[in-house]
Amino acid sequence: MKPWPASSARQGFRSSLYLLGLTYQGFGLLMLAFALLALGWGEDARGFLLGTV
């Protein structure tokens, strides 16, 4: 069995990192929005958000 060419392995690693970064960015934006909403609405909104999860 021949090992993978380094270039294709590196390219696949880079693309998977890119996809992971996009996913984490999306989750970060969602969490930021929830935090801003909770801070803006006060304790009631925080309890509501925590209760629905």
Image: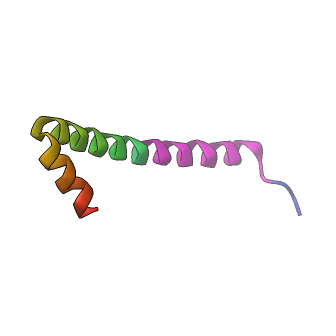
Residue 14 sits inside the magenta stretch: yes
Q: Residue at x 20, y 52 (%)?
A: 47
Picture coordinates of residue 26 (x, y %)? 34, 45
Q: Residue at x 10, y 40 (%)?
A: 41
In the rendered structure, the answer to whether residue 20 lies left or right of residue 50 reads right
Picture coordinates of residue 34 (x, y %)? 23, 44
* Quarter of the image where the N terminus is located: bottom right
Q: Residue at x 26, y 55 (%)?
A: 50
Which picture quadrant has residue 36? top left
* Quarter of the image where the C terminus is located: bottom left
In the rendered structure, the answer to whether residue 24 lies left or right of residue 16 reads left
Judging depth in this view, the residue of 11 and 20 nearest the camera is: 20
Residue 2 sits above or below residue 33 on the image: below
Judging depth in this view, the residue of 18 and 31 nearest the camera is: 31
Tag count: 0
Judging depth in this view, the residue of 50 and 31 nearest the camera is: 50
Q: Residue at x 58, y 41 (%)?
A: 14
Residue 45 sits inside the magenta stretch: no
Judging depth in this view, the residue of 32 and 1 nearest the camera is: 32
* Coloring basis for residues: rainbow
Q: What predominant SS class does the magenta segment belong to?
A: helix
Q: Which residues are magenta?
A: 4-21
